[in-house]
Image: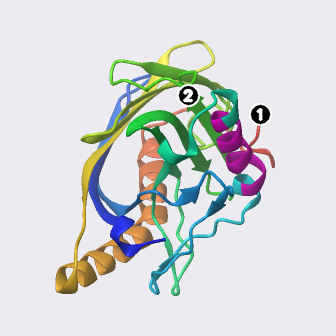
């Protein structure tokens, strides 16, 4: 993986509960955005060259879910591999710790247009599920909303069944997710938006430290928001030993 394809992502996450009670928060999000990380001819990831940040591309979720879906996208729509690219927005691991990503996004582009997105979700029980979203090989436009059934427990204050609606814009990068409860009430509105850029020298080093610091804050932020919801007496849903639907 060429370092020139590695970008610093600076953004903001907005999360708002609109039913049955209101609760919202906004915080800064710093991560890495990687461009063109995958070969669609050999179906393998390019070599990683960064000595500070690393990704694990050998997980079960990737080898048994994501890569087969990438193959399906290519062959089902007879796409020329020369024009296919895979980009990734995900906080990386370091030699200090393994990063926790509640959600990361894989963007499949064809002729510089996004045609597929994978939302890879991980809960605090380390369970994972990927939502595979596409527009039948056609570009995913800014006005298009893609839907999928909710299939993973992600919060003690939300049912593990329901429905998601996703909306994507690539430039600037904006991700919108609306979550509906089993009774089809719009329950949670989430958005992630920001910009990615290349950095070098001291600026790059400071950005790396900032990303590392941001990674350490993820779990504490989750627990703090859960405490606020408990104080507000939101309904509690038990994990019951299995977060999958």
- Residue 232, given in percent of the width and then of the height, sits at 42, 38
- Residue 211, given in percent of the width and then of the height, sits at 35, 71
Q: Is residue 73 above or below residue 35?
A: above
Q: Is residue 163 magenta?
A: no
Q: Is residue 97 above or below residue 173?
A: below
Which residue has dot 1 on it? 245
Which residue has dot 2 on it? 134
Q: Quadrant of residue 188?
A: top left
Which of pointers 2 and 1 lies earlier in the amino acid sequence?
A: 2
The answer to whether any part of residue 213 appears in the image is yes
User: Which one is in front in this view, the residue at disc 2 or the one at disc 1?
Assistant: 2
Which structural element holds mark 1? loop
> Which range of residues does the magenta coloring cover?
63-74
- Residue 113, given in percent of the width and then of the height, sits at 39, 35
Residue 27 vs residue 171, the one in the foreground: 171
Seen at 62% across and 36% down, the residue is 131
Please tell me whether the stretch drawn in magenta is mainly helix, strand or loop. Answer: helix
Horizontal side of residue 10 vs 144, given as left or right = left
Q: Residues within 10 Å of mark 1 (few under 14, many from 20)?
A: few
Which structural element holds mark 2? strand
Seen at 18% across and 79% down, the residue is 203
Q: Is residue 54 above or below residue 174?
A: below
Residue 61 vs residue 24, the one in the foreground: 61
Confirm or deny contact between disc 2 and disc 1 (CB under 8 A): no
Q: Quadrant of residue 32?
A: bottom left
């Amino acid at each position: 993986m060429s370092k020139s394809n590695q970008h610093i992502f600076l953004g903001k996450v907005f999360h708002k509960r609109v039913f049955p009670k209101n609760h919202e928060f906004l915080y800064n999000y710093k991560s890495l955005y990687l461009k063109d990380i995958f070969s669609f001819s050999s179906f393998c990831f390019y070599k990683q060259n960064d000595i500070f940040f690393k990704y694990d591309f050998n997980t079960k979720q990737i080898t048994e879910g994501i890569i087969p879906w990438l193959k399906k996208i290519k062959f089902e729509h007879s796409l020329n591999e020369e024009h296919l690219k895979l980009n990734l927005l995900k906080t990386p691991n370091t030699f200090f710790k393994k990063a926790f990503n509640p959600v990361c996004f894989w963007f499949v582009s064809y002729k510089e247009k996004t045609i597929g997105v994978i939302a890879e979700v991980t809960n605090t029980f380390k369970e994972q599920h990927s939502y595979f979203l596409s527009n039948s090989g056609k570009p995913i436009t800014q006005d298009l909303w893609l839907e999928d059934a909710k299939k993973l427990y992600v919060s003690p204050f939300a049912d593990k069944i329901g429905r998601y609606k996703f909306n994507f814009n690539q430039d600037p990068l904006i991700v919108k997710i609306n979550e509906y409860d089993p009774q089809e009430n719009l329950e949670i509105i989430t958005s992630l938006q920001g910009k990615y850029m290349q950095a070098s020298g001291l600026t790059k080093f400071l950005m790396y430290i900032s990303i590392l610091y941001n990674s350490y804050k993820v779990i504490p932020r989750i627990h703090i928001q859960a405490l606020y919801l408990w104080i507000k007496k939101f309904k509690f849903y038990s994990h019951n030993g299995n977060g999958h639907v």
